[in-house]
Amino acid sequence: MKNWLVCFLGFIILKAIAAQETATREELNKKMLEWHNEFRSKILNCQLEGQPQAKTMPNMTYDEKLAETAQKWADICTFGHDDAANRNPGGYGYVGQNMAGSYTFKSGFDLWISEHEHYDYEGNLCANGKVCGHYTQVRQFSNCVLILLTH
């Protein structure tokens, strides 16, 4: 069994507030991978103010089996995280989940990465009253798989 912390990144976009995006799911997955890998490259190259340079930062990839598992959760139409018992699909060890409700996929992603402003790397904690767990998921060294879901 692989001991990877996998970033299970699902966007749940409520149809009532979501703008129409004309891209196909494959195009959106490609864009999300591009955004993640570009951002992770900034961390690797010490280009993120206030954050230390990563020693290594592998590119993320797409995993169809995780996508199937994630889609089952999205189909339930509950905005929240899946049970911990269901976060070990495909032998990945533990699968983290990031979600966002946003008008566009890019603005949801930007919300996640903006959390770096509130993250203290040395202390491994967020500023008091702030959220930074989405950012730490995106920057996690061992993350290797990205899945995009819409609802």
Image (cartoon, rainbow, N blue to C red):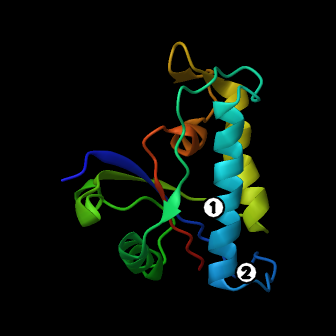
- Mark 2 Cα shell of 10 Å, populated few (<14), some (14-19), many (≥20): few
Viewer-side residue, 100 vs 32: 32
Residue that badge 1 annotates: 33
Labels 1, 2: front one: 1
Q: In the drawing, what numbered circle is on residue 108? A: none
Amino acid of disc 1? Leu
Residue 116, position in %: x, y? Answer: 68, 32
Query: Image quadrant of residue 50?
Result: top right
Amino acid under disc 2: Ala
Residue 115 x, y percent position in the rendering: 68, 36
Q: Is residue 71 visible?
A: yes
Residue 16 is labelled as 2
Q: Residue furthest left?
A: 1
Q: Residue at x 42, y 76 (%)?
A: 64
Q: Who is closer to the viewer here, 15 or 146? A: 146
| Alpha carbon separation for disc pair 1 and 2 | 26 Å
